[in-house]
Image: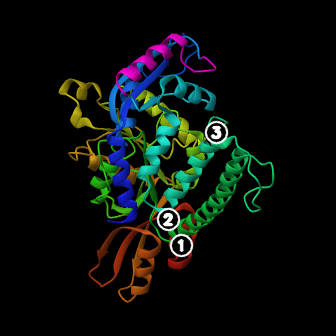
């Protein structure tokens, strides 16, 4: 067993013994304006429980807390804080998860009242990402996000942070407090990670440039966490990427070749799942990874159509895509309604997809239903802006045929009676002239 696996097992063991109460605040104030589909409090509670269980916490219970307004000191109302404190003591709760973004002061005050550790939604998601990261890049991205979060939590709430250092030279001068030292060490580590991630970004750019020399377009899978992206990825590529019924089962991006109906191929990329209120520092840390989505030729938005909050989840995904620079990419986007196998006949009939190239594609990644139609839709979308060229090659022109396989999509090939080869290839608009110069033909 590796050190990483051993550490993971120990974390699971500790988490499974941590009695946890999940608190889900929601606004009771009437929202103004049209903000699109709203997520129900019950759905938010279910998601928060799922996040807690994603790191094996022993969730004793979860409670909904209606809020007319947010209290600056404790986020929750005074009466509700007292009630939850009593509950935490009675049930010997060791950890309270508050499904909201708490300020450092609010977190500290709640810990004093509950006499238990308190983490907010951001902290919980960071813990999950820390557990899921498997590659060196993923670990760096998560650590950067965690340090950004931790830096904001360095407040004078523990005695060891308040004592004065005597000045040992390399950690800080005379009079510098421990909190200032901690903050400076965090900043120095963040600078080192950012430098390493900048190298990763340059490496990814080189990889994309290399792929540009190969005729394989990029298809990126995106969607809300647990929408079934990895199961669909495995179905399309016959791969064995981890696909579990849990939030954030996939963190590190994976790429595989997928065959298209008419003999072409594309590189399929499975990406990290999105979630509502995704911490800004995580979006920033994963920007290098998400650049793969921005550079994709086609983006497949996978939705869990059986989920009660599918519309709200879709809205969150679109918002995050816009934040990473994939805005106004309707010409690239294919919407996939996944998990048809979870719907009864009436719901399936009600979800009958419309006609046309841009209509959603209904599939079940689990059973394979609709996957052929999805592959056809991907191929059709990739064909937009690309030209088909018919070429007649002499039988001796093996070099030319090899060049076509290396630099174009060969859609069809037929051997003529005279020994020649007739080939139909598809090429991007910027490569048409190159093919015409080499073979002296006109595109159609």
Residue 111 horizontal/vertical position (percent): 52, 28
Residue 373 circle label: none
Residue at the spot x=74%, y=62% of the render? 170
| Quadrant in the picture for residue 339 | top left
Q: Quadrant of the N terminus?
A: bottom left
Residue 443 circle label: 2
- In terms of secondary structure, where does tag 2 sit? loop
Mark 3 surroundings: few (<14), some (14-19) or many (≥20) residues within 10 A: few
Residue 433 horizontal/vertical position (percent): 57, 69
Task: Tell us which disc is closer to us: 3 or 1.
Answer: 3
Give the mark, 2 or 3, whose residue is nearer the N terminus.
3
**Which colour scheme appears in the figure?**
rainbow
Residue 343 horizontal/vertical position (percent): 23, 30
- Compared to residue 85, the image places residue 372 above or below, namely below
Task: For marks 1 and 2, give the CA distance.
Answer: 8 Å
Task: Return the residue at label 1.
Answer: 436
Instruction: Judge by depth and name the residue closer to the eye, 78 or 145.
Output: 78
Residue 390 horizontal/vertical position (percent): 42, 69
Horizontal side, residue 443 vs residue 366: left or right: right
Q: Are marks 1 and 2 in contact (CB under 8 Å)?
A: yes
Residue with the most extreme left position: 345
Q: Is residue 295 visible?
A: no
Which region is colored magenta? 71-92
């Amino acid at each position: 067993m590796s050190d990483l696996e051993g550490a993971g097992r120990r974390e699971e063991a500790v988490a499974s013994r941590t009695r946890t109460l999940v608190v889900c605040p929601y606004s009771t104030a009437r929202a103004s304006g049209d903000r699109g589909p709203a997520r129900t409090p019950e759905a938010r509670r279910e998601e928060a429980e799922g996040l807690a269980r994603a790191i094996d916490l022993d969730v004793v219970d979860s409670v909904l807390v209606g809020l007319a307004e947010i209290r600056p000191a404790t986020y929750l109302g005074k009466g509700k804080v007292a009630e939850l404190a009593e509950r935490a003591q009675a049930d010997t709760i060791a950890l309270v998860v508050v499904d909201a973004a708490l300020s450092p002061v609010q977190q500290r005050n709640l810990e004093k009242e509950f006499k238990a550790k308190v983490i907010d939604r951001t902290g919980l998601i960071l813990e999950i990402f820390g557990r899921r990261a498997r590659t060196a890049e993923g670990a760096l991205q998560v650590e950067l996000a965690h340090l950004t979060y931790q830096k904001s939590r360095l407040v004078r709430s523990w005695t060891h942070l308040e004592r004065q250092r005597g000045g040992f030279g390399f950690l800080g001068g005379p009079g510098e407090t421990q909190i200032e030292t901690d903050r400076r060490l965090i900043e120095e580590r963040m600078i080192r990670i950012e430098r390493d991630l900048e190298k990763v970004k340059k490496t990814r750019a080189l990889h994309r440039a290399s792929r540009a020399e190969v005729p394989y377009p990029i298809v990126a899978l995106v969607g809300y966490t647990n929408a079934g992206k990895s199961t669909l990825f495995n179905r399309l590529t016959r791969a064995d990427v981890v696909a579990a019924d849990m939030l954030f089962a996939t963190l590190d991006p994976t790429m595989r070749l997928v065959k298209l109906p008419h003999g072409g191929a594309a590189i399929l990329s499975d990406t990290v799942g999105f979630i509502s209120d995704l911490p800004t520092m995580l979006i920033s840390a994963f920007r290098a990874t998400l650049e793969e989505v921005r550079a994709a030729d086609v983006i497949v938005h996978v939705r869990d159509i059986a989920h009660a909050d599918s519309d709200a989840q879709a809205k969150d995904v679109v918002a995050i895509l816009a934040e990473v620079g994939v805005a106004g990419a309707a010409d690239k986007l294919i919407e996939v309604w996944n998990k048809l196998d979870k719907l009864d006949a009436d719901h399936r009939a009600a979800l009958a997809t419309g006609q046309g190239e841009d209509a959603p594609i209904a599939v079940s990644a689990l059973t394979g239903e609709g996957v052929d139609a999805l592959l056809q839709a991907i191929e059709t979308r990739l064909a937009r802006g690309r030209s088909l060229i018919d070429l007649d090659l002499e039988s001796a022109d093996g070099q030319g045929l090899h060049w076509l396989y290396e630099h174009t999509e060969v859609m069809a090939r037929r051997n003529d009676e005279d020994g020649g080869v007739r080939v139909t290839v598809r090429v991007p608009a910027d490569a048409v002239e190159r093919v015409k110069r080499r073979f002296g033909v006109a595109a159609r």
